[in-house]
Image (cartoon, rainbow, N blue to C red):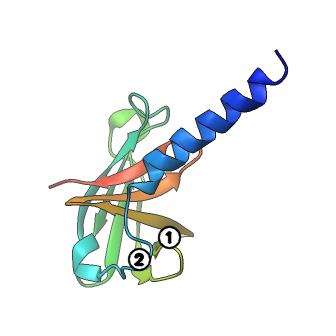
Amino acid sequence: MQTVRPLVLVVIFVLAGASFGCWSSPHRPVKLEELSGDYVCRSAPGPPQHDPDKLTLKADGTFVLIHMPGGRPGSKEEGKWEVVNTSPHPEVGFGRGLFPIRVKGKQVRLLIDEDLGYWYEKVR
């Protein structure tokens, strides 16, 4: 029974890696225009376990992040944002953090916490 547990953990990590591995090419730089737009908070599986936020990345390099406690607009954070094309994956920086970028087709995600499955997803 003890040899089965490590095997199950390996299978879980391989499947998790494969599912996240299908997102953006590690060598393709992301452009500012590609990221500009409105984002909503998402999580896997199911609805977010925290209050939703609404994020807007503007083409002029500024952002607006509205914290929405209880689903109602609350405090607002504004400032500059930028794309940091690092290896192996690019990141977007705004507020006090850097968020890894994942692009799959037309879907854009900014990862808040990859381990817990929280991200901002661009609204089309």
Q: Which residue is mark 2?
A: 79
Q: State the residue at coordinates (76%, 24%).
A: 5
Disc 1 to disc 2, how far (Cα)? Answer: 7 Å
Q: Amino acid at mark 2?
A: Gly
Question: Which residue is more in the foreground, 31 or 93?
Answer: 31
Q: Quadrant of the N terminus?
A: top right
Reading the image, the residue beneath label 1 is: 95
Looking at the picture, tell me which residue is in the foreground, 32 or 77: 32
Q: Amino acid at mark 1?
A: Gly
Residue 4 x %, y %: 75, 22
The answer to the question of whether label 1 and label 2 lie on touching residues, with beta carbons closer than 8 A, is yes
Is residue 111 or residue 14 the one in the foreground?
14
Q: How many marks?
A: 2
Label 2's element? strand
Horizontal side, residue 121 vs residue 48: left or right: left
Q: Position of residue 63 (x, y in %)?
A: 34, 72
